[in-house]
């Protein structure tokens, strides 16, 4: 079976002239095969009538299958490759009221709203989501009878690299595949650049050191043969093999003088070597620590510039580990460079030269252990070494867990979970212990065996060389002198020593490259929010803010803000209301440019936010975050955080305005009082007031308060409001509040719902409009005393529900389990007796709940997809307000009739598109990418993924889920269940 190349088609295709290279290429104008054209003809549609024609790669059930979607100005048709005569689905455009794409797991669905139902038209894998996003937009235009002309924008995903087609992390990133990043080693050498002088000195000293160490055995030889054994060396009739006196002045010396001279030379060499060692060691440590220092600085600098979206995905523990521990690898590299492997390699080469020059025969015997050494290295690298990486990873995990435990200690205590946490820790600690044990046992076995192998070489030389010396004793012309043999042993020691260390070379290289990989992975992460090439400096903004058609989602597939447009004039005070999760904080995140918009523009004083220097921008925006964060330090430190040069009087003024002066004065050391991590020691409201004061102190042009008064009592709130009245004068301020009373004085109130701006106006105007805001205010003031929008709306819905269809008691009651209901509340369990799941028109799923109503356009989601794939299934639909709602839950699909089971399973298939990996054939690393060849439930596949922690995440207790560059998903439910070979291949790269 041909291997499907998941991400490759796009990449390969993009280099063929039909794609990016050619301006005529058109994703939304793919010509259909003849059979489909013929079918269209029969329906009276000519190829020229087609406004859109696009191919998708999977069908609704998530199988790889080619499907076409074609649209004329009047209708829309979907064809399957397997059945080209008749369309699978047709739809008059006027029947639909809206088109959209929804992101489901690993894929997306193009939907049309027909009547009340969102109808699934076509499904596509994540690789194609951009094009179908465009298609939905275009279909909406066609539906509204707009004339469309397809453009470049429709056919080229701006997030793909223009030359290789790789999906980039964000638009405009330098393609990591197209720039040659080189190997870790050469990059480390680049880091060395500022220290090249020192590096050269180290190298020279190293060479001197080596040369000196070659002298020693020669001196030994001379000592034995020339001084100790043979009268006056070089005299006539002496030993032919005895060394001649190298210098003329030696001729007149007595043996004792010679002895003294040689011993002196030996001592001299040793002393020089020691001096060099001391000097070199110090230099190496100095350079090594400096480089580590540099790299740490660069890492932290880079980490601070990375956008918040990076931190949404990373665990702080792992980043701490990289800065603190992985940088040590570089220090190790320096010591390897001076005393380590480089020296040892040179030593092996030089000593073998000398050994051959003394006796080629012995030199050959010396090589006897070499094959064993090689075999040993291979075994070590294959089987022992991976245990080390596992051990490192486990110890990292344990540190992370401990970190979580200690920082969450309040919750642990509050829920009385100390024992369970201890148990969890002990389990993790036990795994670490076992990993360490494995490592140590292998090392304890491996090294003595290797040492024995080397000694074996020694035995052979003693025997063979010894025989030569015996021969020489009888016949001075033959064999070899004792001195030579001793010199030979001297060289052999220098040969085996480094050779045995070289067995570690491979493991050192691996650990070195993993650690540097982790460092460079951070350094190479592009800064998504960076200044424009020529940023506009804006030392003093006016404070006009404009949103123009802003669309944004934290992940690209799910927009949180949808086409939001509004204008705020400088100096206005704006209130934002909306239910929890509607996108209020998101608006602020965008104004502060913590994230960049996906579509549309945000303008400050008429300039696009992205053109303004970020530093300038943030200096003029004062934000009080929803979760105020205080650093460890004094209250004063926290207060002047944004403006370290503030004068005491200014600080007190700001503090009074934020209504925090008084509580600060009540602290033991007033402004110099120490607050613990995250502001421990202060109450929630005190922390909030302090952060308001902190923001005010910076005198921002734009002041943003996100729920800043939510945990402040009414009296303080009033006090803050009064103070604010003064302080917001002349600045643009945006205030988000659940408590509507806070917003009464606003110049403009905006109501956000599901990421859309649904109402705006002054309090008075909105009350006259009598829309959502008015309703909220009415409920707040009259019906309930509650002042939270959520409780109000929840209450509202409850009322509506009660007023509408009565909920059958049998659906609420739960005779099947003895689980005590939580505070009298039960989920609504659907039962085959009381609910009927059936097919509606156009393949939509309907659910009739007996004695209640029919729900149209239902879809199913799993509560626990990993643990319970066919239990606890939630049936959901979009209610009349187009909001997603749960109809009820299915406890176990197996309890349902076969037909219902089939329908629910099909509906589930539409929501999840994952490849389940059953075998890993090979993994190749390529410049920070892994190229996987695997077998999956959807056939053999090949895919690329970035080699980083966030692209391979835990899936349940024992599994992993991989995300390739196209954002397709690959799951290994249980890594331990892979075959041994697959697992080895996998764990070699994904060991965390
Ligand atoms: P609240 O009143 O509860 O503060 P909000 O209106 O401020 O709500 P937002 O924080 O803007 O809500 O969030 C809007 C949506 O975006 C929510 O559905 C939330 O789950 C999602 N969201 C928020 N932050 C992130 C993030 N960092 N990554 C992914 N999704 C996010
Ligand atoms: Mg919020």
Image: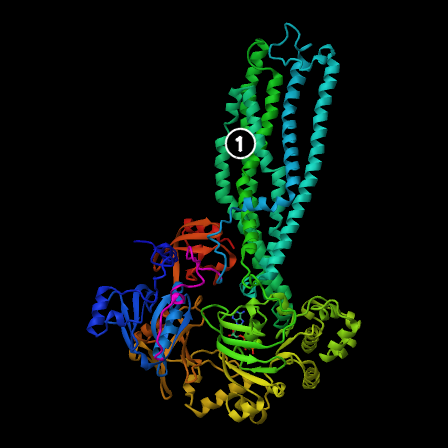
Front position in the image: 875 or 780: 780
Is residue 437 rendered to the left or right of residue 557? right
Q: Position of residue 253 (x, y in %)?
A: 74, 12
Q: Residues within 10 Å of mark 1 (few under 14, many from 20)?
A: some
Residue at position x 48%, y 79% in the image: 754
Please give the range of residues in magenta.
144-169
Residue 401 can be seen in this image: no
Q: Quadrant of ligand 2?
A: bottom right
Q: Position of residue 594 (x, y in %)?
A: 57, 68
Q: Residue tagged by mark 1?
A: 453
Front position in the image: 337 or 545: 545
What secondary structure is the stretch in magenta mostly built from?
loop
| Residue 732 part of the magenta-drawn span | no
The quarter holding residue 422 reads bottom right
Front position in the image: 635 or 457: 635
Residue at position x 41%, y 51% in the image: 982
| Residue 153 part of the magenta-drawn span | yes
């Amino acid at each position: 079976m041909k291997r499907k190349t998941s991400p490759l088609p796009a990449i390969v295709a993009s280099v063929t002239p039909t794609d990016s290279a050619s301006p005529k290429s058109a994703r939304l104008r793919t010509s259909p095969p003849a059979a489909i054209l013929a079918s269209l003809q029969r329906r009276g549609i000519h190829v020229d009538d087609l406004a859109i024609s696009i191919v998708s790669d999977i069908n609704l059930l998530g199988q790889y299958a080619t499907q076409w979607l074609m649209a004329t100005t009047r209708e829309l048709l979907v064809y399957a490759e397997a059945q080209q005569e008749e369309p699978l689905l047709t739809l008059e455009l006027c029947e639909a009221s809206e088109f959209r794409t929804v992101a489901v797991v690993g894929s997306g669905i193009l939907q049309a709203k027909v009547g009340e139902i969102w109808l699934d038209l076509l499904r596509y894998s994540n690789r194609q989501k951009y094009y179908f996003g465009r298609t939905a937009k275009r279909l909406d235009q066609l539906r509204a009878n707009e004339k469309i002309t397809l453009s470049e924008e429709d056919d080229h995903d701006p997030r793909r690299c223009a030359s290789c087609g790789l999906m980039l992390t964000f638009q405009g990133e330098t393609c990591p595949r197209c720039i040659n990043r080189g190997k870790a080693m050469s990059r480390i050498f680049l880091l060395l650049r500022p220290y090249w002088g020192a590096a050269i000195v180290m190298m020279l000293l190293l060479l001197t050191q080596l040369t000196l160490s070659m002298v020693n055995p020669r001196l030994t030889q001379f000592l034995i043969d020339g001084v100790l054994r043979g009268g006056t060396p070089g005299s006539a009739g002496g030993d032919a093999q005895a060394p001649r006196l190298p210098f003329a002045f030696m001729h007149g010396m007595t043996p004792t003088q010679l002895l003294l001279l040689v011993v002196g030379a030996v001592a001299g060499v040793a002393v020089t070597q020691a001096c060099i060692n001391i000097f070199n060691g110090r230099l190496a440590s100095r350079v090594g620590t400096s480089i580590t220092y540099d790299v740490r600085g660069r890492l932290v600098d880079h980490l601070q510039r990375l956008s918040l979206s990076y931190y949404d995905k990373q665990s702080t523990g792992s980043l701490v580990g990289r800065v603190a521990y992985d940088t040590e690898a570089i220090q190790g590299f320096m010591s390897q460079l001076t005393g380590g492997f480089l020296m040892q390699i040179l030593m092996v080469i030089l000593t073998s030269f000398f050994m051959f020059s003394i006796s080629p025969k012995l030199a050959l015997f010396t090589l006897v252990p070499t094959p064993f050494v090689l075999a040993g290295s291979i075994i070590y690298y294959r089987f022992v070494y991976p245990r080390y990486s596992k051990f490192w990873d486990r110890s990292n995990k344990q540190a992370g867990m401990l970190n979580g435990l200690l920082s969450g200690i309040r919750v642990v205590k509050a829920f009385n979970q100390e024992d369970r946490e201890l148990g969890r820790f002990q389990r993790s600690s036990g795994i670490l212990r076992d990993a360490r044990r494995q490592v140590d046992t292998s090392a304890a076995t491996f090294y003595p065996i290797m040492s024995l192998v080397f000694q074996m070489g020694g035995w052979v030389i003693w025997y063979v060389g010894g025989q030569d010396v015996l021969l020489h004793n009888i016949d001075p012309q033959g064999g070899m002198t004792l001195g030579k043999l001793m010199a030979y042993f001297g060289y052999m020691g220098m040969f085996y020593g480094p050779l045995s260390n070289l067995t570690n070379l491979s493991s050192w290289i691996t650990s070195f490259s993993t650690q540097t990989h982790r460092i460079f992975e951070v350094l190479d992460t592009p800064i998504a929010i960076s200044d424009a090439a020529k940023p506009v400096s804006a030392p003093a903004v006016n404070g006009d803010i404009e949103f123009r058609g802003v669309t944004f989602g934290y992940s690209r597939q799910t927009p949180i803000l949808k086409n939001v447009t509004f204008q705020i004039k400088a100096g206005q005070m704006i209130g934002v209301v909306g239910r929890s999760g509607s996108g209020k904080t998101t608006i602020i995140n965008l104004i502060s440019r913590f994230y960049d918009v996906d579509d549309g523009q945000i303008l400050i004083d008429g300039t696009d936010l992205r053109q303004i220097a970020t530093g300038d921008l943030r200096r003029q925006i004062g934000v009080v975050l929803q979760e105020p964060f205080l650093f460890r330090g004094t209250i004063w430190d926290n207060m002047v955080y944004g403006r370290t040069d503030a004068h005491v009087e200014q600080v007190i003024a700001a503090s009074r305005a934020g209504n925090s002066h008084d509580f600060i004065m009540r602290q033991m050391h007033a402004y110099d009082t120490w607050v613990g991590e995250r502001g421990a020691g202060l109450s929630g409201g005190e922390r909030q007031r302090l952060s308001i004061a902190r923001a005010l102190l910076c005198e921002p042009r734009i002041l943003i308060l996100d729920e800043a008064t939510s945990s402040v009592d009414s009296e303080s709130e009033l006090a803050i409001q009064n103070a604010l009245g003064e302080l917001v004068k002349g600045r643009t301020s945006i205030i988000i509040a659940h408590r509507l009373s806070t917003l009464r004085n606003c110049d403009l109130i905006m109501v956000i719902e599901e990421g859309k701006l649904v109402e705006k106006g002054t309090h008075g105007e909105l009350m006259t409009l009598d829309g959502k805001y008015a309703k909220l205010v009415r409920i707040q003031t009259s019906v309930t005393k509650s002042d939270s929008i959520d409780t109000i709306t929840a209450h509202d819905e409850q009322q509506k529900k009660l007023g509408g269809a009565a909920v059958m008691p049998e659906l609420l009651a739960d005779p099947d389990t003895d689980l005590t209901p939580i505070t009298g509340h039960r989920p609504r369990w659907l039962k085959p007796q009381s609910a009927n799941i059936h097919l509606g028109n156009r393949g939509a799923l309907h659910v009739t709940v007996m004695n209640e109503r029919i729900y149209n356009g239902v879809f199913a989601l799993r509560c626990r997809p990993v643990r319970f794939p066919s239990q606890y299934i939630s049936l959901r639909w979009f209610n009349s307000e187009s909001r997603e709602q749960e109809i009820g839950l299915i406890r176990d699909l197996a309890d349902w009739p076969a037909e219902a089971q089939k329908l629910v399973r099909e509906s589930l298939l539409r929501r999840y598109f994952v490849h389940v990996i059953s075998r890993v054939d090979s993994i190749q690393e390529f410049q920070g990418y892994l190229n996987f060849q695997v077998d999956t439930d959807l056939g053999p596949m090949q895919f690329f993924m970035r080699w980083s922690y966030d692209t391979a995440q835990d899936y349940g207790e024992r599994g992993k889920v991989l995300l390739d560059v196209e954002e397709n998903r690959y799951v290994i439910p249980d890594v331990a269940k892979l075959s041994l070979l697959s697992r080895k291949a996998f764990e070699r790269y994904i060991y965390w």
